[in-house]
């Protein structure tokens, strides 16, 4: 690129002046660093253009030299104590100038000190200059922050960024060393074991379907006793199905035996008004396929449940997200699947034949977020259509409904969910209602009243540490009192395995320890566990991570309590979840950049000593402990214990 003469003169004058003052001073431009692996909210860091490949421009002034980021982004630059100053200008790129959502804080850190923090910047505001001393610092961190209101349109430009430094050693962009992936879940035992939820539900007269999740050496013999009238057990498929007319709480016993031994558990079948008595577990097409979802991909997912034995660890729902709908309704105004699907009813039958359940997606608005037909004014027709197809789960996504509400008040927020839940309840089958409106108006306070079984508490998750940590930790502590059987806070789907939101899949960008933290916290939060990856390409690490029955049991515990933060010190947080049978799950997280030794003091976390401690991930007893216990927690990693 040709540097215009006047810029060359400015830069060289600066260089000259600096060399007089400090001896040999060099300059490296921000855009010349290797920024290829920077994690950010959307897309990748663009050099000399905005994220749409247009010239950089802030408040109608264009810039030839700079980078464009998408909040949240974090660029770490190692200075090695040789740097002198960092100068730049920052602002929101003009291509979102009409975007009312764009809002960014630009932050510059020298080691842990804040050297610069902008006020909240919005579109069409002039660039703000930054000029800070770096003397005495080892590391420079440039942050584009989403201002805690979601990252929609948060495209932040850093223009004319330059670092002056002395000596030969250039500052360089730093990326933590790739972490080796390690397995913690022990291999599946040969002994018979019944996994997953110990409770299930249906309404009187609705079809009941439950596949018993069981592992152990084959052949396994399963016996079920005490089934209520109307249900039968098929030992070939391990599926209990049928219809129970009379409401009641039916306790059945499930026995499994093989050459290695036998086991017996009690399972409650609750025939009543509530569904989803434990958080729904399954798969959703969105994080893998985005709008590219097709019947073939959904069938592949169903087959992968079999191939990887996921159903025997409690994974049940196969949910189709946006992208299944045809562009027009049928002449009788019913919804139609598009040409990527053959027959939704046959697809549901296929899922049911494996003991799995099928989910679908729509919006209370005229259009979904992916601009497909929504259910506005056709709520009854659509609910009946889904009922006819044999759908078991509906994700109902706010999207374009935002443009039609007359006022932003709770009555308006509740209205479309009350309406669709009324239609669903009128059906002769059970459809779990998953509300998706990103946490508007503290939905956790009223989601259950509006008929929801689960409700998203935040904007969409992506596979970055910042996104997962903000959604899973900072946003969840106030929601815990509202979680209960049939009513779950939903911090969005899991970002593990191969993801891509479209045709181009890649591995999750979370490190190994970040993935343990992600799954652990979702288990602790009693969150719906929805895998969001291509199941066909399930790798051995992800499979090991998602089939730990003791971790899943924490999520599926019948008490249905959500974890809350009990202790915080520096980078360490301890979360506690009450379990049935007077057990407690305790998760210790390290948000720091380095591994840390943490001394767990039972009194500090509100527990008495002399507890039996078991590591849920490794499934090993640690023993009876007194007062304190020292644990080493990896960078961004965690430990998960069950205490008795
Ligand atoms: C919204 C939701 C996502 C997904 C898409 C589909 O963004 O939050 O989970 O359903 O819509 O368009």
Image: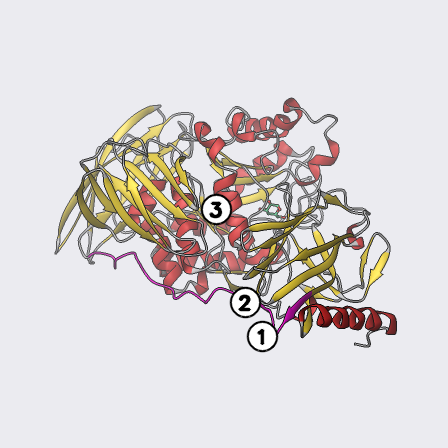
Disc 2 target residue:
80
Could you tell me how many numbered marks the image carries? 3
Question: Between 94 and 281, which is closer to the camera in this rendering?
Answer: 94
Q: Could you say where residue 112 lies in the image, as x and y percent from the top left?
A: 54, 51
Residue at 42 percent of width and 25 percent of height: 273
Callout 1 touching callout 2 (CB < 8 Å): yes
Disc 3 target residue:
358
Instruction: Give the SS element for disc 1.
Output: loop
Question: In the image, is residue 203 part of the stretch drawn in magenta?
Answer: no
Disc 1 target residue:
169
Instruction: Give the SS element for disc 2.
Output: loop
Q: Magenta region: which residues?
A: 163-189
On the question of residue 428 being in view, the answer is no
Q: Could you say where residue 252 lies in the image, as x and y percent from the top left?
A: 24, 34
Q: Callout 1: 10 Å neighbours few (<14), some, many (20+)?
A: few
Query: Comparing marks 3 and 1, which lies closer to the viewer?
Result: 1
Q: Could you say where residue 254 lies in the image, as x and y percent from the top left?
A: 22, 40
On the question of residue 405 being in view, the answer is yes
Residue at 45 percent of width and 63 percent of height: 536
């Amino acid at each position: 690129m040709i540097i215009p003469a006047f810029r060359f003169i400015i830069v060289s004058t600066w260089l000259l002046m600096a060399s007089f003052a400090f001896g040999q001073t060099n300059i490296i431009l921000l855009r010349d660093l290797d920024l290829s692996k920077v994690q950010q909210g959307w897309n990748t860091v663009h050099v000399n253009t905005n994220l749409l490949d247009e010239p950089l421009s802030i408040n109608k002034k264009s810039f030839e030299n700079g980078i464009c980021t998408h909040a949240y982004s974090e660029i770490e630059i190692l200075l090695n104590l040789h740097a002198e100053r960092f100068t730049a200008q920052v602002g929101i790129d003009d291509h979102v100038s009409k975007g009312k959502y764009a809002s960014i804080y630009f932050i510059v850190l020298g080691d842990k000190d804040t050297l610069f923090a902008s006020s909240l910047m919005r579109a069409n505001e002039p660039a703000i200059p930054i000029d800070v001393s770096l003397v005495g610092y080892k590391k420079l961190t440039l942050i584009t922050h989403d201002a805690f209101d979601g990252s929609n349109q948060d495209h932040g430009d850093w223009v004319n960024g330059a670092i002056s430094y002395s000596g030969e050693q250039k500052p360089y962009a730093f990326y933590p060393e790739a972490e080796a992936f390690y397995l913690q879940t022990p291999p599946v035992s040969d002994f018979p074991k019944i996994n997953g939820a110990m409770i299930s539900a249906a309404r009187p007269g609705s079809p009941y379907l439950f596949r018993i999740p069981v592992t152990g050496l084959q052949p396994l013999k399963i016996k079920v006793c005490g089934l209520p009238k109307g249900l039968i057990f098929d030992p070939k498929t391990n599926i209990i199905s049928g219809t129970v007319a009379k409401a009641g709480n039916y306790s059945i016993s499930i026995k499994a035996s093989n050459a290695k031994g036998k086991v017996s558990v009690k399972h409650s079948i609750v025939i009543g008004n509530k569904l989803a008595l434990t958080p729904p577990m399954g798969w959703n097409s969105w994080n893998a396929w985005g709008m590219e979802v097709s019947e073939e991909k959904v069938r592949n997912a169903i087959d992968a449940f079999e191939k990887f034995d996921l159903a025997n660890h409690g994974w049940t729902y196969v949910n189709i997200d946006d992208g299944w709908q045809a562009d027009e309704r049928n002449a009788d105004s019913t919804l139609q699947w598009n040409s990527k699907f053959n027959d939704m009813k046959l697809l549901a039958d296929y899922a049911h034949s494996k003991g799995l359940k099928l989910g679908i997606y729509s919006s209370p608005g005229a259009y979904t977020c992916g601009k497909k037909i929504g259910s506005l004014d056709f709520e009854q027709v659509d609910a009946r259509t889904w009922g006819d197809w044999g759908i078991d789960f509906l994700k109902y996504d706010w999207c374009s409904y935002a443009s039609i509400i007359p006022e932003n008040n709770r009555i308006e927020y509740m209205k479309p969910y009350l309406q669709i839940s009324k239609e669903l309840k009128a059906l002769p089958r059970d459809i779990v209602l998953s509300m998706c409106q990103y946490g508007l108006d503290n939905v956790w306070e009223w989601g259950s009243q509006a008929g929801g079984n689960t409700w998203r508490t935040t904007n969409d998750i992506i596979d970055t540490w910042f996104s997962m940590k903000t959604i899973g930790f900072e946003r969840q502590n106030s929601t815990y009192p509202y979680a209960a059987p049939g009513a779950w806070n939903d911090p969005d789907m899991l970002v593990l395995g191969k993801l891509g939101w479209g045709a181009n899949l890649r591995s999750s960008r979370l490190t190994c320890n970040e993935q343990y933290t992600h799954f652990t916290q979702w288990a602790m939060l009693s969150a719906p566990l929805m895998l969001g990856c291509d199941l066909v390409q399930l790798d051995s690490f992800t499979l090991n991570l998602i089939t730990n029955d003791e971790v899943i049991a924490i999520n599926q515990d019948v008490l249905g309590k959500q974890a809350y933060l009990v202790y915080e010190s520096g980078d360490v947080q301890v979360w506690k979840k009450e379990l049935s049978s007077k057990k407690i799950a305790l998760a210790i997280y390290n948000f720091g950049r380095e591994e840390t030794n943490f001394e767990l003091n039972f009194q500090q976390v509100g527990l008495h000593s002399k507890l039996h401690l078991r590591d849920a991930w490794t499934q090993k007893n640690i023993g009876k402990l007194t007062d304190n216990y020292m644990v080493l927690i990896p960078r961004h990693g965690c430990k998960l214990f069950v205490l008795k």
